[in-house]
Image (cartoon, helix red, strand yellow):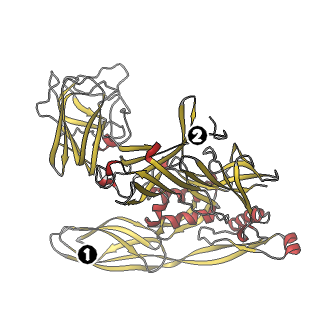
Amino acid sequence: MEYSDNPRKIYGRVEIIYSDNEISRDIQPSSNSLALISHPNEVYEPTLVPTIKACTMEGNSIMDGSFQMMDDTVKCGWWSASICNANGVFTTPPWLELSFIQRPIISWIIIGDEKRGEYPVDFTVEYKRNGTVVTTQSLRNNNKMFLRITAYETDITSVRLTITKWSRPNAHAKIIKFYDKLSEMYEGDAVQMFELTEEMGNEEGNYNISSDTMMVNLYNEGRKFDKGYLRSLMVLDRKLLPAIGVENNGTIEYTSLGVFYSDEWNISQDSQWVRCSAVDRLMRLQSKTYVGLPLTMDASLYDIAEDILLQQDFKTTEFEISEDLRDVVIPKAYIPKESSWDALQEIANAGLCKVFVDRNDKIIIRSESETDTVSQISINKSNMFSFKSSVSLTEFANRISVEYCDIELDDNLTEAVSVTLNIDPNAVLELTLDYTQDVAYAMIESDNLNISLSNFSSGVNACTVTATNTSGALQTAKLTVTGYAIQVSTKTLTVQDDDSVRDSGVTEYTHPASDLVQSHEHAEFIARTLLSKMRAGQGVVTNVWRGNPGLQLGDEYHASDRFDEDNTLTCEFNKFTYNGSLRQETRGRKKF
């Protein structure tokens, strides 16, 4: 079956991950036995196989070229310090324990070292609630490298693995995985309906950040959400993965519609349905503080955008930035302390970018020069319910104004902030200090030698620093930050389409100002790019149609109206509504 078939059968499902290594940042490993190289935090990460076949000195390695020496760069999981005897038995059994926020346990995974062919033979798993053992599972004569054990327990706060016998004599215990995510799949009658949006840019055509939203109604079977085993997990940031599917040769083929994080749970005792609202990962950046970018000479927009995301602990695999932003070099780049959301908006304004999250949960910073992916999906009178074409006032202009600025530094040092602190004996304070003015090349000092300052990181209007009282007595210290004051003067560049102005009069658009636009050339590039788009009055087409999840943001597609006039469009918005059937609203920007 295809999405274009009529009639058709549409399937919807939502997987909710209540606990995994990414959203459960509270996981804490502990052990009574750690080898010199041992990474117990890796046992709850996605790695299932060590990165190398580790060479050891206890007689279990040979010089056949397959073994490699270890260091702290390898993925190896937990290695015990103790070594078992010639029979594989540990005199003092090593144990590994994971502690986490209260959660139910449905199953648990234990994986040994596949590269070396080693695994636990005799072991015990203890499930604890606030330090008290609730239940114990003891396994003997295990011969499996990968083992999933089941245990239906609620409100568990830690799990301990104790190994008494190993599969190889005279060897360390080696566990690469000791964890299992908690997730449930809701489909069929368990899903009353769900609705979600994905957006790459707003209808007005501005360069901005777009955050996606989702809502789903789920069947509260056995009152599990408010009285049962899931009650302690009705919190923020649970991960929702919606999907739409059709049957093909007896198999339902699903298309993922993105990743969302729970923002609100609505559980009514008067209803059998639970409503969950969720947002994408970008929305959280509105409440995350970016301390700022210190004044940096010749920084590219790519480097600045990367710094913003890395400062919020995103991995490089979790975002994608248009490569051409490496060529947009800012002579004296800086960003003041503000929310990470606002900082990314600066990138969007200066680089003519759209910032959004794709269906793989990856943050995309997409410049105007990116090439659209051509989709074979088309919308026409055979599959659409409505067609609306519109041009807003902000989409047509024949005169464009763009501000740019000159940055200069004072020759003399000036005081940015001065604070007096009372610090308890041996206390350590993590401080954030806001400046009274913007400065470059900031420095910090204390007037008390008993107060040690470390981890100083400064933007232009704020800094973070660690202050440590190295004495055993209460100390008073004055901390002073100095730097060179930043002076900003702005200029405005205006370009226009003379023919259009003569024929139609002036329609002016002023681009949002950004301190990252610092040259006449950069301002002119922005102005002429906007003029070439806005004098055409591109406008958008909005369709409500039967839908196909194969049409994604950034795709080029065709939509024809009821008079068969064809439009070539770039997909900027989709709204999916599933309630046993599929209905989709799509907005595309016209291409000329």
Identified at 34% across, 59% down, the residue is 269
State the image coordinates of residue 297 (x, y, percent, origin top left): 55, 64
Which one is in front, 489 or 136?
136
C-alpha distance separating marks 2 and 1: 74 Å
Q: Label 2: state its secondary structure.
A: loop
Numbered tag placed on residue 9 in the rendering? 2
Disc 2 crowd rating (10 Å Cα; few below 14, some 14-19, many 20+) is some
Q: Amino acid at mark 2?
A: Lys
- Residue wearing tag 1: 448
Disc 1 crowd rating (10 Å Cα; few below 14, some 14-19, many 20+) is few
Q: Quadrant of residue 40?
A: top left
State the image coordinates of residue 490 (x, y, percent, origin top left): 64, 77
Q: Label 1: state its secondary structure.
A: loop
Q: Amino acid at mark 1?
A: Asn
Quadrant where the N terminus lies?
A: top right
**In this picture, is 246 found above or below 586?**
above
Numbered tag placed on residue 306 in the rendering? none
Left or right, 455 with reference to 512: left
Which one is in front, 488 or 560?
560
**In this picture, is 309 found above or below 375?**
below
- Asked whether the viewer can see residue 234, the reply is yes
Quadrant where the C terminus lies?
A: bottom right
State the image coordinates of residue 75 (x, y, percent, origin top left): 35, 37
Identified at 36% across, 37% down, the residue is 74
**In this picture, is 382 found above or below 137?**
below
